[in-house]
Image: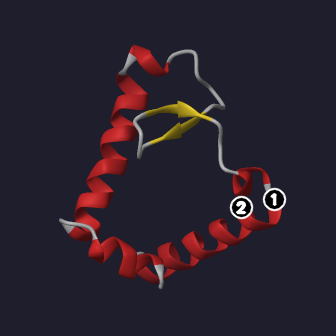
Amino acid sequence: MGLSAVLWGISGGIKYCIKIGADILIKAALSEAFTDVSGQYFDNDIGQFTVAPPDAANAVTCQQVIDVMDGIIAKNMCE
């Protein structure tokens, strides 16, 4: 099952998922709770900092994720 299928299965769909991510970014930029946590992993499912999953330290996996995101961005960019 692809990521988009998973996201569409969530109540509210992909717009809801994007809102969650945007809310976290706003909180990270403006909240004092994020002042001293540079480089730590925030798990938005549990709403706190925790140990990152093993794939986060795998350079190959990280590059694959970046490549997929770059492809999505390139496909959806407005000129």
- Residue 69: image quadrant is bottom right
- Residue 25: image quadrant is top left
The C terminus sits in image quarter: bottom left
Q: Residue at x 66, y 31 (%)?
A: 39
Residue type marked 1: Ala
Q: Which residue is mark 2?
A: 62
Gap in angstroms between the C-alphas marked 2 and 1: 5 Å
Q: CB under 8 Å between callouts 2 and 1?
A: yes
Q: Is residue 18 visible?
A: yes
Question: Label 2 neighbourhood size at 10 Å, few (<14), some (14-19), many (20+)?
Answer: few
Question: Label 1 neighbourhood size at 10 Å, few (<14), some (14-19), many (20+)?
Answer: few
Question: SS at mark 1?
Answer: helix
Vertical position of residue 36 compared to residue 70: above or below: above
- Residue closest to the far left: 12
Apparent side of residue 61 relative to residue 30 in the rendered image (left or right)? right
- In-front residue for pair 71/13: 13
> What is the x, y in percent for residue 37?
58, 22
Q: Residue at x 27, y 68 (%)?
A: 10
User: What colouring method underlies this structural image?
Assistant: secondary structure
Mark on residue 59? 1
Residue type marked 2: Cys
- In-front residue for pair 74/12: 12
Q: Is residue 79 visible?
A: no
Vertical position of residue 23 compared to residue 36: above or below: below
- In-front residue for pair 12/39: 12
